[in-house]
Each structure stands twice: as structure tokens, then as C-alpha cells.
Image (cartoon, rainbow, N blue to C red):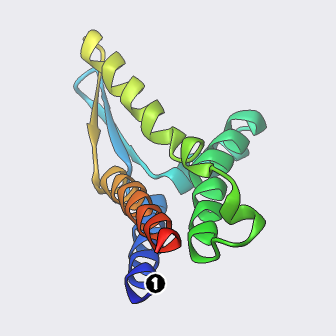
Amino acid sequence: MLVLISLSIIEAMCLVLGIFSPFAKIQEFWFFGEEFSVYRLIITLFDQRNFLLSGTILLFGILIPLARLFGNCFPDSKIGRLNLHKLAMLDIFLISFLLFSSQLSYFFEVSLLEGFYFLFLAMIISNINRWFLRRNRRL
């Protein structure tokens, strides 16, 4: 049980650091560069009245991972029984697509920063935590 609590605390810290740390840097035309975090991206899109995209990133990048974390902490709850691992971290897929696009273009380049790695680490820890939960249920 101590392992599950420790993993949940580490996952929560990685998730928070991943949301607020710079996620990626986009370098355009070799002159202009901009770093962004998941939090700053949601705020910017919301300010630009792009509610659908900001809501999608908020849902899949923050709310579902938080619900997944809550489900790992309380596995017997309704949220704990949902299989949220398949929906969470959609932003990891999207940044992978952005990286692929930058490899095909001469006009912009994308570099991953620490926020991406914190989110990726949170996803890995969550899967390990879920594995421990399933293993403890069998015993």
C-alpha cells in the first residue's frame, strides 16, 4: 500500500510539473522561437475564443489525467473502474504529430522541453501504479 501511495504522490508531482513547465519550443524561420506549456496554451486559446480546442486540451491534457490519478488512489470508486488510461495524455500523441510535421517542413522546428518529459513520466508512473493495483487485487 505504501508503494501505491508513493507512486501516486510522484505521479501527481510529475503531472503538475508537466502542466506548468514549458512543453515544447517552436522555432519558425530560424529567427522566431516560442516556448509554451499546457497551461499557457489553454489560457491563450481561451483568450483567442477558441473554446473547442482549449476545452479539448483541458479535458484530455488535465482533467482526464487528474481523474485517472484519483481513480488510482481510490480504485473501488466509479472513476477507479473506468478505463481512463486509453483517453489520457492525448497531448503526447498530438505533440508527436507536431514533431513529425516539423521533420517534413523547412519552415519550423519543434524541440521538446521538460514539461513533455514530466507528462510522459506521469503517464508511465500511472501505468505502473495501475499494474500494482491489479496485482494487489489478485492476491
Q: Is residue 69 left or right of residue 115?
A: right
Identified by mark 1, the residue type is Ile
Q: Is residue 103 above or below residue 31?
A: above
Secondary structure of residue under mark 1: helix
In which quadrant of the rendered view does residue 131 lie? bottom left
**Residue drawn where x is 56% and y is 42% of the image:** 86
Q: Is residue 56 left or right of residue 4?
A: right
Q: Is residue 39 left or right of residue 136?
A: right
Residue 83 horizontal/vertical position (percent): 63, 50
Residue 48 horizontal/vertical position (percent): 70, 38
Front one among 116 and 29: 116
Q: Quadrant of the N terminus?
A: bottom left
Residue 51 horizontal/vertical position (percent): 77, 39
The residue indicated by pointer 1 is 5
Q: Is residue 53 above or below residue 13?
A: above
**Residue drawn where x is 57% and y is 57% of the image:** 65
**Residue drawn where x is 41% and y is 69% of the image:** 132
Q: Is residue 11 left or right of residue 51?
A: left
Tell me if I can see residue 49 in this picture: no
Q: Is residue 52 above or below residue 69?
A: above
Residue furthest to the bottom in view is 2
Residue 82 horizontal/vertical position (percent): 69, 54
In which quadrant of the rendered view does residue 49 lie? top right
**Residue drawn where x is 68% and y is 40% of the image:** 56
Q: Is residue 93 above or below residue 7?
A: above
Tell me if I can see residue 136 in this picture: yes
